[in-house]
Amino acid sequence: MRIISLWLLVSVLPLLTSPVVSAEPLRVASINLCADQLVLLLADDNQILTLTNLSHDTAGSYYYEKARNFPANKGYSEKILRLAPDVVIAGQYTALHTVKLLTEVGLRVESLPIANSIETLIDNIRSVATWVGQEERGQAIITDLQQRLLNLEPVVEPRPVAAAYDPNGYTSGASSLRGQLMEMAGWRNAATDAGIESYGQLSLEQIISMAPDALIDSPYSPGTYSRAQMTSRHPALLKAGLDPHIISIPSRMMICAGPWTVDILERLQEERIRMTTVQ
Amino acid sequence: MSNAPANRRLPVILCVVVALLFIASLAIGREPLPLFAALGSWLRGDDAVHGIILSQIRIPRALIALFAGASLGLCGAAMQGLLRNPLASPGLVGSASGAAFFAVFVLYFGVSNTMPWVLPIAAMCGAMLATIIVYLMAGRDASITTLILAGVAVNALATAGMSLLLNLAPSPFAVRELVLWTLGDITDRSMADFWLMIPTTIAGWLLLVGVGGQLDTLTLGERTAESMGVNPQRLRWRVFIAVSLAVGAAVATVGMIGFVGLVVPHLLRPYVGYQPGRLLMVSALGGAAMLLAADIGVRIIPTDTPLKVGVLTALVGAPFFLRLIVQSRREYV
């Protein structure tokens, strides 16, 4: 018994204390695009082992420039295993089999929930900061964001109407992040008027008869063709006078949430104030 | 000649049906539209909501259904007359899928951004190419089975090619639009789309003017027709080119809407005394009526995601097709 405890003292204790002593950085692998963004935001460069290949994409990744400094993975477990990260960050609903496999072989896998509100975004920043061992940096960012949220202008009635408008007329209602941003920025959401809770479709005819004051789009790959993308260029919309008030948010800001989400919020508020003072 | 009055009445009846369906197509939609108020607003040009919905969404949609349906019905009748084969139609002999393949290529790979007129021309070439391949593979006096088999092969090839193109297309939304091309869809087209399809459509129609008499003569057999002054070779090319023009334009705009060109000439044949020449015009009217009706159907049937118009034409057309096969087995075996 004594020998065992002695052995524990000699072999395990140094292991437990070594991160503190040698300040060996916690090394991270991300297999989810939105996790990539928060890792890039919070971790030190020497902590990042790999990010998803999507993180290099200009249309989908906010920190694509910085991400290109790091090797990409396609979410295959073999590559992740070979890198032997201290923590793997995955999306909540993506690559379930990979996550299961990585957990079974003994890696620490954390899953990041989808941020469908500002509150979840802040929770996510806090979680990732903890996972990568950068709590202080995370807290500083959160404090800054919360301050910016407090500085928002009050909502003035009557609120102008806006509709989020994606290819094929897809739109977001109140229980989505985009819906919440519109609400907080002082817009009335046309999707809510049409009875859409989270995601749904608005037909061209609905859009025209509701005549929203603005359309919010985030073109994912401008310049390419699909019938879906043509809906937002239909002459009926131009004729209805919706054309001048398209608020275009780059898709790399819309696909994943991050501190830039508050930039969107401020932009939407600015557009709303401009519109209500002009009229 | 005993049924002459009925013959003369048929085009009139069909015209009335098409006109009624056209008006219904303007009035019916997911959003209720007060037709007269909308018409007034449009004519006054005051850009009120109803006027815009009518002039920019519903009218192009109804016009496109009218012209595309007429093209499909007309071309079905022309091909059945030319090949003397009740199963010939743009959908079965590959014209439609060939057109769709080329249209997809031009649209999704950005060629038509700078030169929109390339679209109908490309679709016409695709239709032509597919038709000729099927025709060459099946041979001049092909049996029904050979023709259908050749058609199946070319259709499969064109659809696979289309799927490949849509997978490779730069737009992330392209992949999901295969169904839109294979089943056809008229939702949210604009007047620009309509004007783009019109020149080639009309060219195809005009090329078929006067073909009727020759098709009638052809029913007596190729030799006899030749002795009566019909040049079968020239007639064949004329019909193929006309069909490619009209079907190409229709498919490039609305996708491959099946069975219109097959069903309509069949339904109407008994009423025109089985004469291919007289079948042409009534088939055009019938095709327009069928497509307008199907397009009204997809707007009335309350599904969460709107149905594709080809779903309805296929639901009506496929059983019809099966009946034809049973019938033709009885006749030809």
Image (spheres, rainbow, N blue to C red):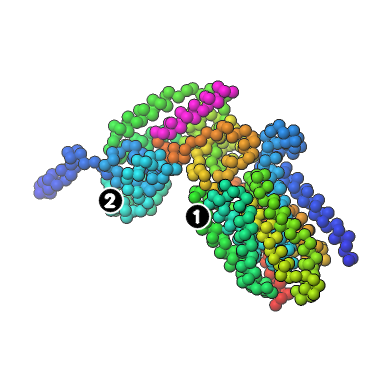
Q: Classify B331 as above or below A85.
A: below
The kind of residue tagged 2 is: Leu
Q: Main secondary structure of the magenta part?
A: helix
Residue B161 percent across, percent down from the top left: 54, 60
Whether residues under marks 2 and 1 lie with C-beta atoms below 8 angstroms apart, the answer is no
Which residue is at a point 75% across and 60% down the rendered structure image? Answer: B208
Which residue is at a point 18% across and 44% down the rendered structure image? Answer: A15
Which residue is at a point 71% across and 70% down the rendered structure image? Answer: B233
- Marks 2 and 1 sit apart, C-alpha to C-alpha, by 32 Å
Q: Residue B30 got which mark?
A: none
Q: Which residues are magenta?
A: A259-279
The kind of residue tagged 1 is: Asn
Q: Which residue is mark 1?
A: B167
Residue B73 percent across, percent down from the top left: 72, 58
Q: Classify A27 as above or below A270.
A: below
Q: Which residue is mark 2?
A: A83
